[in-house]
Amino acid sequence: MATDYDSPRKADEEMSEDSLQELQARRTDKGTSTIDVDPEEVAEGMELPGADLSNEELSVRVLPRQADEFTCSRCFLVHHRSQLAEERSGQLVCRECAA
């Protein structure tokens, strides 16, 4: 559920004044909203498995690993030095893999 942090907050007294019926009505009102999606628009951006992509070219610029980055010895992803958790016998391990 999204929270609007800009809206004014209720005091404890105001929150206790909300009746059970009002809260249930709010819940049902939020659940009844629907999103109208055109299936043709969704299908245009989708590629089917096994589609012939031999004529497609990738336009991605690949940068070499920077001086302040390392490659994790477990997940083989390149991380910033701030993500370094430990070094075991010369093997660098990121925080995600160390957890």
Image (tube, helix red, strand yellow):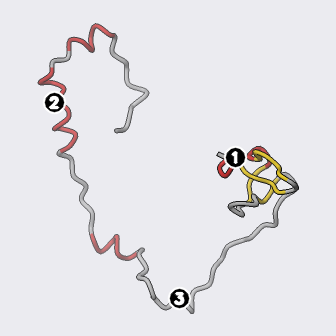
The residue shown at (24%, 59%) is 36
The three-letter amino acid code for the residue at tag 1 is Arg
On screen, 74 above or below 23?
below
Q: Nearer the viewer, mark 2 or mark 3?
A: 2
Q: Secondary structure at mark 2?
A: helix
The image's mark for residue 24 is 2
The percent coordinates of residue 13 (x first, y second) are: 28, 7
Q: Of marks 1 and 2, which one's residue comes earlier in the chain? A: 2
What's the CA distance linking mark 3 and mark 1? 37 Å
What's the CA distance linking mark 2 and mark 3? 51 Å
Q: Nearer the viewer, mark 1 or mark 2?
A: 1
What's the CA distance linking mark 1 and mark 2? 43 Å
Q: Secondary structure at mark 3?
A: loop
The percent coordinates of residue 47 (x first, y second) are: 43, 80
Foreground residue among 95 and 78? 95
Label 1 sits on residue: 95
The three-letter amino acid code for the residue at tag 3 is Leu
- Residue 86 lies left or right of residue 11; in this view the side is right
Choose top left, top right, bottom left or bottom right for residue 18. top left
Q: Which quadrant holds the C terminus?
A: top right
